[in-house]
Amino acid sequence: MDRRYTKAEKGKGLALDPDEPQVKRIKTPALDTTELIRENSLTLIGRVTNPQEQRIQTLLPSLPRKLNIQGRVQGSDLGNNCFQYIFESEEDLQSVLANRPYHFCYWMVLLQRWEPVISNSFPSMIPFWINIKGLPLHYWQAPLVCKIGDELGLRESHELSKSSARVRVLVDGFQPLVKETIIEFESGEESKITLEYERLENHCSICLRLSHLKSQCPLNPPRAGCPEDAKALDPTPHSRVGRTDAYVQSREFFSSRREETETRSTHNDAFYQRVDRHGRAFGPRVSTRQTRNPPPPKHPNQEVTSKLQAPNLEREPHYASPPFTHNRELHVRTVSRGRALFP
């Protein structure tokens, strides 16, 4: 039996598209990165969760105002929706990390200390204080609260009191948030608890991701006959074709409704079936709105005069003096000569 030839020997295989751009691969030489690792030890790397709403060029000068640091900070755009801040002191860097999470334009911002790693998903962690609701009171104990934090992500700390139980956890910003969970006890009973994230801004209420809203969620099917929902799920919302299709659909929908209304009003109204003695239709009904007597207009001269005099009356109030007569009788006191002035 003859030997089977391979595809390489036969020269067969999938033909590559000559127009498809080829990604060139470059190998790096042997480099010593010790010095650069030391220089970037005071660097924070950040990532925006919604690039359509968060502009990095606007974020770089505005975010340091919220950091409340003493020294200077230098920011730059790294591309791929990432940016960096270089600090002057370790104290400023630690204070910024302790006050996380941050948000910009009502969307969350991922911020981590730089690490000498090669990963397209770095940074991806964001810390949250999570309030635990629905836990039975007699199970408000530190081991259970810490266990819940460990299941949610990388636990940093926890706080437990008689009125609240919360845990600070580093969660993956690329994964959906966990807002509900079921606690299984040793007795076989179960309890459903809810998790409330502090300082959480915009996110999807369906898939619980930080990158979009409910209207843009791929798990939210568009409603029938609603072009706006179809436009929101369009991967190219700014394309001219998407806008034209939605516009044409809406125009066709409202045009059909208008034609149905006009046809129904034309055939159902008995007035349009009447004709005169020559067999001609009377035509459309004449509206009586224009034949109604309008309210009497104001006198034009009186209106202009009132407009001109109104500001003068406000600025120069008129003061009227009491009336008097020029021909007043002078009451002169007469002294009789026969009597003394001072008796």
Image (tube, grey):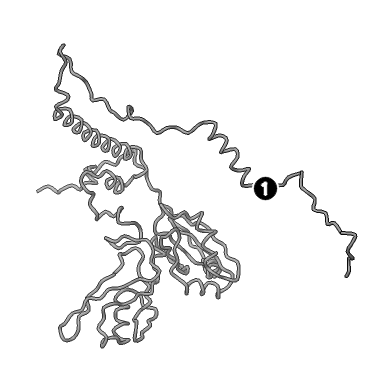
Q: Nearer the viewer, residue 335 or 28?
A: 335
Q: Nearer the viewer, residue 338 or 45?
A: 338
Q: Which residue lies most toward the left here? A: 1
Residue depicted at x 31% and y 82%: 145
Residue 327, percent from left and from top: 76, 44
**As drawn, is 169 to the left or to the right of 283?**
right
Residue 66, percent from left and from top: 52, 66
Residue depicted at x 14% and y 22%: 273
The quadrant of the rendering that contains the C terminus is: bottom right
Residue 320, percent from left and from top: 67, 47
**As drawn, is 170 to the left or to the right of 194?**
right
Q: Nearer the viewer, residue 281 or 4?
A: 281
Residue 242, percent from left and from top: 31, 40
Would you identify the image quadrant in which residue 258 lies?
Answer: top left
Q: Nearer the viewer, residue 36 or 8?
A: 36
In the structure shown, which secondary structural element does the residue marked by tag 1 occupy? Answer: loop
Relative to 125, does residue 136 appear above or below in the rendering?
A: below
How crowded is the residue under tag 1: few (<14 C-alpha within 10 Å), some, or many (20+)?
A: few
Q: Which residue lies most toward the front here? A: 338
Relative to 335, does residue 223 appear above or below in the rendering?
A: above
Residue depicted at x 33% and y 28%: 290
According to the image, label 1 marks what residue?
A: 320
Amino acid type of the residue that numbered disc 1 sits on in the rendered structure: Ala
Tag count: 1
Relative to 66, does residue 221 appear above or below in the rendering?
A: above
Relative to 125, does residue 157 appear above or below in the rendering?
A: below
